[in-house]
Structure formats: structure tokens, C-alpha cells
Image (tube, rainbow, N blue to C red):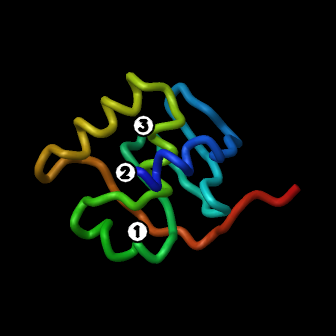
Amino acid sequence: MGRARREAGKVQFLIAGPDLWIAAASAYNVVIDVSAKRVQHGCRDFLGQARERRLCKHVAALLLAMDREVALEVLRSLTVPYGEWHLEVIAARGFKN
């Protein structure tokens, strides 16, 4: 959690809520779509952990940087066994300026 906290201050938002959050965390894109109940990301840690419904530091950093109540609701619903959330791998990195 310490690494995610350090990264949270560096998160760059492309879209910031209320139901869609798209951001770059350490040059990796992270998407949290509350309406579609989908988390999309592509770092190596996420690739392995998504199957176990665990999150990497980049997704955790976005959750720490976004609206607290929305983040808590996302976390609550992610922890429900066989929940409706989809954790999907994407390959894109960062935003082009």
C-alpha cells in the first residue's frame, strides 16, 4: 500500500468521474468504469493478479487519487465473491501530449 500511496500523488487524470475514471499512473493507463463495472489496466503485476481479483499498485494509486466514496464503493463491490466487476487487461501506456 505504501507504493500505491506514493504513486497516488502522480496520477494524471484524462477523465475524472463521476462514473468513469481514466488516468495514467506511472505511465500506465488505468480505467475504472463504474457504470460498466470494469477495471482495465495492463502492467505485468495486474496480468497475474487480475485472475485472483487482486489489484496492482497502479490501480490502487488511482483508487487513492479518486473520489473517496466512489473508491470505497468500487472496493466493496470488487470484494464480493463472483461479483459483477470485470478486470480486463489493456496494453496502452500513458497519454500522448
Instruction: Report the Cα–Cα distance between label 3 and label 2.
Output: 22 Å
Residue found at the far right of this picture:
97
Residue furthest to the left in view is 81
Instruction: Name the residue at the top extreme.
Output: 69
Q: Which residue is mark 3?
A: 34
- Indicate the secondary structure of the residue bearing disc 2: loop
Query: Going from the N terminus, do you reach mark 2 or mark 1 first?
Result: 2
- Residue 12 marker: none
Q: What amino acid type should be assigned to the residue bearing mark 3? A: Val
Residue 96 picture location, percent across and down: 83, 60
Q: Residues within 10 Å of mark 3 (few under 14, many from 20)?
A: some
Tell me the tag on residue 46: 1
As drawn, 77 above or below 30: above
> What percent of the width, then of the height, locates residue 16?
62, 33
Q: Residue at x 67, y 62 (%)?
A: 27
Label 1's element? Answer: helix
Give percent across and percent down for residue 5.
48, 45
| Distance (Cα) linking label 2 and label 1 | 15 Å
Q: CA distance from mark 1 to mark 3?
A: 19 Å
Q: Residue at x 11, y 50 (%)?
A: 81
Left or right: 43 with respect to 46?
right
The circle on residue 1 is 2
Of labels 3 and 2, earlier in sequence is 2
Identify which residue, 27 or 35, lies in the foreground. Answer: 27
Viewed as shown, does residue 12 lie left or right of 54? right
Image-quadrant location for residue 70: top left
